[in-house]
Image: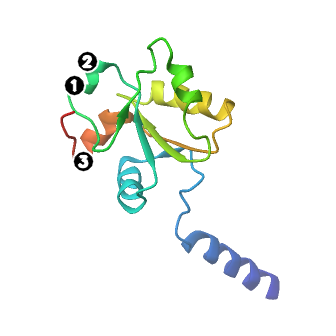
Amino acid sequence: MKKILILLMILSIYCCSPADTSNQELLTPTAFAEELKSNTDIVLIDVRTPEEVQTGIIEGAKAMDYNAEGFEGKLDSLDHSKTYFVYCAAGKRSGKALELMKQKGFIHVTSLDGGLKSWNANGLPLTKP
């Protein structure tokens, strides 16, 4: 009986604790937006093409076209110790960018799950560049 109570206490602590999003690689649009709002040290990178960026960006984003020549060089010039959030249109390029950044030694990189498609579906705001 004692073992069951201890197990239940451990499970309730684990299940009811607030989520720690600091090391998650993918965040839902809502969690992504909340983290951006609460942490001004996050560097936000939009890895879409310049044409896509012209349709609207998340406020504060820095445009770095994943498909452009020199993308890896731009990554190399960034401070690897900072926290980076990346996004694209649907999540594929930002996922690739995240993996590339991890390979290059970036420690804190998170991608927007579902990209701007999911962001827009959740009614979150964009701004014009």
Decide: marks 2, 1 in contact (CB < 8 A)? Answer: yes
Q: Is residue 38 above or below residue 100?
A: below
The residue located at (45%, 37%) in the rendering is: 86
Q: Nearer the viewer, mark 3 or mark 1?
A: 1
Q: Real-space Cα distance between discs 2 and 1?
A: 5 Å
Instruction: Provide residue 65's location: percent of width, then percent of height.
Output: 40, 21
The residue located at (25%, 41%) in the rendering is: 121
Along the horizontal axis of the image, is 86 left or right of 48?
right
Q: Nearer the viewer, mark 2 or mark 3?
A: 2
> Does residue 1 appear in this view?
no
Q: Real-space Cα distance between discs 2 and 3?
A: 20 Å
The residue located at (51%, 25%) in the rendering is: 74
Residue type beneath disc 2: Glu
Q: Which mark is residue 51?
A: 2
Q: Real-space Cα distance between discs 3 and 1?
A: 17 Å
Residue type beneath disc 3: Leu
Residue in front for this viewpoint, 25 or 56: 56
Q: Which residue is mark 3?
A: 124
Instruction: Provide residue 96's location: percent of width, then percent of height.
Output: 54, 25
Decide: marks 3, 1 in contact (CB < 8 A)? Answer: no
Instruction: Provide residue 91's location: percent of width, then percent of height.
Output: 43, 30
